[in-house]
Image (tube, rainbow, N blue to C red):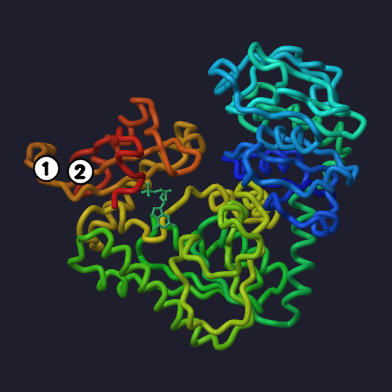
Amino acid sequence: MQKVLILDFGGQYNQLIARRVRENRVYCEVHPHDMPMEEIRRFAPIGIIFTGGPGSVYLPDAPKVDPAVFTLGVPILGICYGCQLMAQMLGGRVTAAQNDAAREYGKTQTSFDPGCALFRGLPEESVTWMSHGDYMAQAPQGFRLAAHSAVCPTAAICDEERRLYGVQFHPEVNHTAYGREMLHNFLYGICAAGGDWTMADYKTQAIAGIQEKVGDGKALLALSGGVDSSVAAALMAEAIGSRLTCVFVDHGLMRKNEGDQVEAAFAHRDLRFIRINAEERFLSRLASVVEPERKRKIIGEEFVRVFEETAGQIGAVDYLVQGTIYPDVIESGKGDAAVIKSHHNVGGLPDSVNFREILEPLRLLFKDEVRQLGRELGLPEALICRQPFPGPGLAIRIIGEVTKEKLDVLREADAIFREEMARAGLGQSADQYFAALTNMRSVGVMGDGRSYDYAIALRSVQTSDFMTADWSRLPYELLDRASVRIVNEVRGVNRVLYDITSKPPATVEYE
Ligand code: XMP
């Protein structure tokens, strides 16, 4: 498999660069900028990309790269800081921009030399996304200028003989009109990529790798019903069959029919599937609890306890499988973090479960690759495209005390909202949407009588990172249909509200 190496100088778009490369069906990995030369040689990249970064290349503590990288004969693309670093290390000159005009931030009209292989076949003028306060005053010897903007004569440089390219702008962000095409040119036109990264091949290789590693050992997996743990389970099952045990703790806080759907998705597979129906246990621990953090804590602890008891009954296992994916690995900043993390919807896993090693079969995949792998493994589309669903489930979508009665009300209302979103063709365009039970009751009139019932809040958000989110501008007709149906079909609800708060200041969930 051909591989591209992305050397990380701390830029904010590094993951995006990796995504763009993978979208081009070329495998890549992000590694720290000081990756030792012998490791780089062993990695055997067909091309190297230097990312952007917050530093200034002329400062003493600026992150550098081993200069021997330029003698490998491998094509290099430097982006922003990466471009300045390449220029400086090869004898060019980089300085702080003299005045505000030479600094560039935002969309910038840029002219290109289509004779440069990076810009071949693209318009001679287009918009790029700039974000630099430093400035390449002089390109190194052997390089020529390949793009300029009104204030910056050195928007791109290239030495086609040595196949070294640098751009001051960010081709990986959408604001750069032809950024995708430029990366495609780099990968295919310059690095001679063949596009050999597909999920069908990955599946075959991953299964062979797991079989070799696990041998005739046994593995245990905590299945949440989320995309990552489900795909990890299906992949492991293909590899080791019934030597995999999946434990699905149904805490009774799932959405309508969700527990059964998870079970059905794995029913016909060759694995051991254990569903623990722990609704009563969770609800009795949650009785009278109204404080949000307390609720979360109780659910997390109870999850660990149930899992631990089940694992104890199964006996010693060799491997604990986790659904860690590549963004978590990149963010943790190290390539081999084999610690038990409390992510992936299943709470923190217990230390006392008896296993030898952790397996993370998805640790090199991005989310959309995980979904594609799920399709290759024949998982149902509803599971593959499942929205993020928090580990504490509906408990944090019910303000105040959680009871079975309230859960049932919320499940029905939520199912109707999701049905109406799908019917309106918006099921995939909003990033997360759900109903919440406000715990507020108000007076209404139904038929000839007075009602005093709950208000349901509908929430739908647009977000790419879930750190910030904007509320979805849903059509009134859709909101109207959902409202009418919820009030008519769900007993105990007489009012429907639509939440028009962004995050911040609100959060996506209610608790
Ligand atoms: P907030 O409410 O913090 O949610 O704006 C941001 C995203 O995180 C999800 N979320 C959780 N996911 N365990 C999870 O696995 C949790 O305890 C949890 N709390 C919030 C939430 O659904 C949204 O996607």
Label 1 Cα neighbours within 10 Å, binned few <14 / some 14-19 / many ≥20: few
Confirm or deny contact between disc 2 and disc 1 (CB under 8 A).
yes
Residue 442: image x %, image y %? 11, 42
181 up-or-down from 268: above or below: above
**Between 443 and 131, the one nearer to me in the picture:** 131
Q: What residue type is labelled 1?
A: Ser
In this rendering, the count of numbered labels is: 2
Residue 35: image x %, image y %? 73, 55
SS assignment at label 1 = strand
What residue lies at 72% left-to-right and 41% top-to-bottom? 50
With 289 as the anchor, is 307 left or right in this view? right
Circle 2 residue: 455
Q: In which quarter of the image is residue 303?
A: bottom left
What residue lies at 31% left-to-right and 71% top-to-bottom? 282
What is the number of the mark on residue 442? 1
120 up-or-down from 412: above or below: above
